[in-house]
Image (spheres, rainbow, N blue to C red):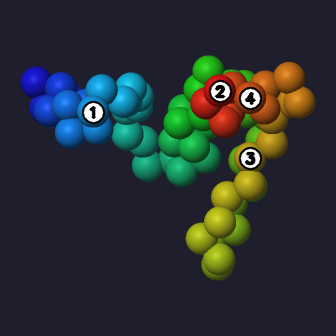
Amino acid sequence: MRVKAVVDELFGEKVDIINYTDDIKELIKKSLSPAQVMDVKIDEENRHATCYVLDEEKLKALGK
């Protein structure tokens, strides 16, 4: 029921739910699903992540 309240607040915008994990690389990969992420590089000092996907997966990773 709480998810429905969030969707209603977003005027029907679709929302994806992913299971939490302490593994930040895995969390990022799950968040970009259904795209297949080849690699994730984490720069902890600058709090930045770079994800690598094949060209044909790029639009999926961007949510298009």
Give the mark toward the camera: 4 or 3: 4
Contact, mark 4 vs mark 1 (Cβ under 8 Å): no
Q: Is residue 6 visible?
A: no
**Amino acid at dot 3:** Cys
Crowd rating for badge 4 (residues with CA inside 10 Å; few <14, some 14–19, many 20+): few
Q: Is residue 42 left or right of residue 53?
A: left
On residue 64, which mark appears? 2
> Closer to the N terminus: mark 4 or mark 1?
1
Contact, mark 2 vs mark 4 (Cβ under 8 Å): yes
Residue 18 sits in quarter: top left
Q: What separation in Å lies between label 3 and label 1 (alpha carbons)?
A: 30 Å
Give the mark toward the camera: 2 or 3: 2
The residue located at (65%, 27%) in the rendering is 64
**Amino acid at dot 4:** Leu
**Amino acid at dot 2:** Lys
Crowd rating for badge 2 (residues with CA inside 10 Å; few <14, some 14–19, many 20+): few
Q: What separation in Å lies between label 2 and label 4 (alpha carbons)?
A: 5 Å
Percent x, y of residue 37? 73, 33
The residue located at (53%, 36%) in the rendering is 31
> Closer to the N terminus: mark 2 or mark 3?
3
Percent x, y of residue 15? 37, 30
Instruction: Check disc 3 and report the residue beneath it.
Output: 51
Percent x, y of residue 24? 54, 50
On residue 59, which mark appears? 4
Instruction: Check disc 1 and report the residue beneath it.
Output: 11
